[in-house]
Amino acid sequence: WILHLPNHNYLELLSSLRNVGKQLATSPPPIFPPLKRPSIESLSRERKDRFEQVQDATRHAWRGYADVCLYSKKDQQSKYLGNHIPFDDLSPVSGRGHDWLYHAATLYDSLDTLAIAFGVDSEEFNQALQIVLKRDL
């Protein structure tokens, strides 16, 4: 569903995006069958260690984002626009969340990463998915 219109002006692009949005509302994109995840038991010890390190790093990043940006009680008034809107990203030095037009892009962008790193049955993926499904879009 990526639109590439190299010879169109801005207004034509917006019009095309509206049309694509209407099409998506009536016929969502196809859902591909999930890929079968290889068994971690079949990996060599070295690859298994690397796999677990990547999972640990991803889990650390997700929990840091979720704790500060999704569940923080600080700056609660800036996290509301109709329904609960989480912060978009986390500033690692200050440890605070940052909003940019209340799009929660990091939350949506995290879904595929969490699905790849942990699988669609994981606690991390389902936590993110539940928050996305509760959003008032």
Image (spheres, rainbow, N blue to C red):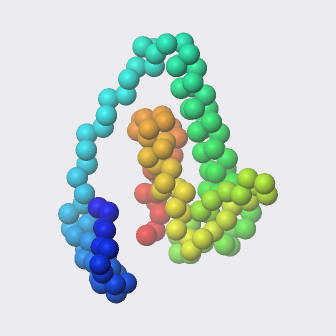
Position of 3 compared to 77: left or right? left
The quadrant in which the C terminus is found is: bottom left
Against 121, residue 104 (above or below) is below
The quadrant in which the N terminus is found is: bottom left
Name the residue at the front extreme.
7
Q: How far across and down, in percent of the image, does residue 99 sit?
A: 63, 68
Residue shown at 56% from the left, 32% from the top: 55
Residue shown at 48% from the left, 44% from the top: 113
Asked whether residue 25 is in view, the answer is: no
Name the residue at the right extreme.
94
Q: How far across and down, in percent of the image, does residue 47 sit?
A: 52, 19
Against 82, residue 108 (above or below) is above
Quadrant of the image occupied by residue 50 = top right
Against 7, residue 34 (above or below) is above
Residue shown at 62% from the left, 36% from the top: 57
Asked whether residue 87 is in view, the answer is: yes
Q: How many marks?
A: 0
Residue 74 vs residue 43, the one in the foreground: 43
Name the residue at the bottom extreme.
11
Position of 38 compared to 27: left or right? right
Q: How far across and down, in percent of the image, does residue 44 sit?
A: 49, 13
Residue shown at 32% from the left, 63% from the top: 2
